[in-house]
Image (tube, helix red, strand yellow):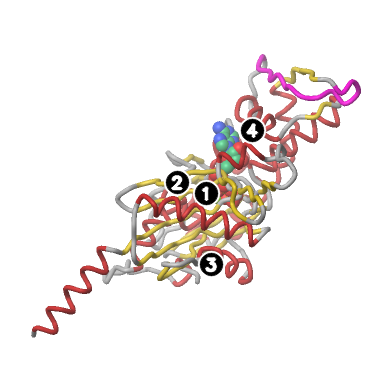
Amino acid sequence: MVGKKKKRKRGLNLRFWQRDLAIDLGTTSTLIYMPQKGIVLEEPSVVALRNGTVAAAGKKASRMLGRTPPGITAIKPLRGGVIANFEMARKMLDYFISRVLRRFPFLRLRIMITVPYGTTQVERRAVLSAGKRAGVKEACLIEEPIAAAIGGGLPVAEPRGCFIVNFGGGVTEIAVISLGGIVLGSSLPQGGETIDETIQRYVYRRYRMEIGLSTAEEAKKEAVYAVDPPEDLTYTFRGINLYSRTPDTIEVKAAELHEVIAPQLAVLSGAVRTIFEQIPPQLAADVMEDGVVLTGGGSLLHNLDLYLSREINLPVRRVEDPFTCVVRGASEALGYLGSLALPENRSPSLFPR
Ligand SMILES: Nc1ncnc2c1ncn2[C@@H]1O[C@H](COP(=O)(O)OP(=O)(O)OP(=O)(O)O)[C@@H](O)[C@H]1O
Ligand SMILES: [Mg+2]
């Protein structure tokens, strides 16, 4: 009897010291969410190293990109949603987790990290081992579209088709989810960052001007429309004239920028159409009723919902907070792991390990 009491007491203590962290490890940014605390970290996925040790990570490292003196390297360790440089990714993640845990001490840590749909076993293992550090008791992965759907409040566990388009920085995933699993899906190696690169290349070729990627991103946020760009809207680029090698400005119409990114959007709408054509009839009926849900920072592109709804002839809506819904969904899924009453339809694909 006494032994039992003691056991129960120890169990309670351990739970008190347990911390759960959901981590959205994205190409553009990393977000960490802690139940009851909310978003505890939101930083660009950039790390700067000096002599092998982390000199800076996140915003500070992001400002160093392309501006580092010899001896310091600032890089983005993810490309197309997956780890491109394992050592850098591990160091960056370790730095971010340590920063969060300095504020919230722990003994046992459970983490859930997001991975894009369709990643290989090798890529998944890389993410898992990048997340492993002292104190991590349990680490598991969740596919981004599922996390996005949970965070967006969709009925993922029900036998009802949910159509998700998660437009991130380096990858865009299209998925039909039912009963907690991905019934159909595809992943495109393009996202918001590819749009920035397309704009940068265009300005270089057409106007012979060199601009930074952050300038291209700013132009995208302000003046790039997926459809119906305002006629009188222009964007003034500041950069380096390639002929004179001096600072220069050029004014480009929003309509012209719209033409520049149109091929990339055509690939997206083509992929959405292809998935829709393969949906089993019953799920197709659900999707026709509920429409397509947009998540991810890239979905903030002006008129993207209008463009897709015209192209595929279905209702399209963006979730309220497209940036954070993935990490919030991952955190919610983490909550089911320790629960005795698992959701009835929890599918193994909800928690790929
Ligand atoms: N207002 C906006 N208009 C258009 N694009 C935007 C806007 N705000 C942010 N973005 C873009 O959203 C992208 C980042 O989105 P998000 O944070 O969802 O990507 P990620 O999760 O880091 O990447 P991934 O999931 O592809 O690995 C960036 O390319 C950024 O430029
Ligand atoms: Mg993402």
* Magenta residues, start to end: 232-245
Question: Gap in Å between the C-alphas at discs 2 and 4?
Answer: 31 Å
Label 3 or label 1, whichever comes before in sequence order: 1
Question: Gap in Å between the C-alphas at discs 1 and 2?
Answer: 8 Å
Residue hosting label 2: 41
Horizontal arrangement in the rendering, residue 135 relative to residue 315 (left or right): left
Q: Residues within 10 Å of mark 2 (few under 14, many from 20)?
A: some
Secondary structure type for disc 4: loop
Question: Gap in Å between the C-alphas at discs 4 and 3?
Answer: 36 Å
Question: Gap in Å between the C-alphas at discs 1 and 4?
Answer: 26 Å
Q: Is the CB of the residue bearing disc 4 within 8 angstroms of ligand 1?
A: no
Residue 192 in the magenta stretch? The answer is no
Q: Amino acid at mark 4?
A: Ala
Front in this rendered view, residue 186 or 197: 197
Q: Amino acid at mark 1?
A: Thr
Q: Residue at x 38, y 55 (%)?
A: 155
Label 2 or label 4, whichever comes before in sequence order: 2
Residue hosting label 4: 226
Q: Are marks 2 and 3 in contact (CB under 8 Å)?
A: no
Q: Is the CB of the residue bearing disc 1 within 8 angstroms of ligand 1?
A: yes
Q: Nearer the viewer, mark 2 or mark 4?
A: 2
